[in-house]
Image (tube, helix red, strand yellow):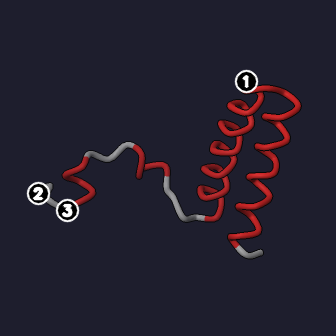
């Protein structure tokens, strides 16, 4: 699926949540969407759990 279409669907979901549920529902849908995005990237193998716990120096390769 094209990323533009995915973005459009996400925007429409946020718009419906904001319109029908108010600002609190908008924030909840946005937060859960971000969590779902992270889980999806993790399951696809784009992210590893260790990526979130390494120091900046370890990521740059400066650690000896």
Instruction: Tell me, for residue 24, which label it has, or none.
Output: 1
**x%, y% of residue 44?**
64, 64
Residue ID at (68%, 31%): 27
**x%, y% of residue 10?**
75, 53
Residue ID at (85%, 41%): 16
Vertical relation: 21 (above or below) 17: above
Closer to viewer: mark 3 or mark 2: 3
Closer to viewer: mark 1 or mark 2: 1
Residue ID at (77%, 75%): 1
Alpha carbon distance from label 1 to label 3: 42 Å
Dot 3 falls on a residue whose secondary structure is loop
**x%, y% of residue 49?**
49, 49
Considering depth in this image, is 44 or 35 the residue closer to the camera?
35
Residue tagged 2: 64
Closer to viewer: mark 1 or mark 3: 1
Instruction: Tell me, for residue 61, which label it has, or none.
Output: 3
* Relative side of 28 to 19, left or right: left
Task: Point out the residue furthest to the left here.
Answer: 64
Upstream in sequence: badge 1 or badge 3: 1
Residue 2 falls in image quadrant: bottom right
Residue 3 falls in image quadrant: bottom right
Residue ID at (22%, 60%): 60
Considering depth in this image, is 7 or 56 the residue closer to the camera?
7
Dot 2 falls on a residue whose secondary structure is loop
Upstream in sequence: badge 1 or badge 2: 1
**x%, y% of residue 35?**
64, 42
Vertical relation: 33 (above or below) 40: above
* Relative side of 52 to 57, left or right: right
């Amino acid at each position: 699926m094209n990323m533009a279409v995915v973005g459009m669907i996400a925007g429409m979901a946020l718009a419906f949540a904001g319109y029908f549920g108010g600002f609190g529902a908008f924030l909840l849908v946005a937060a859960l969407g971000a969590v779902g995005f992270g889980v999806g990237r993790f399951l696809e193998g784009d992210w590893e759990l260790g990526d979130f716990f390494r120091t900046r120096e370890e990521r740059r390769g400066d650690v000896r």
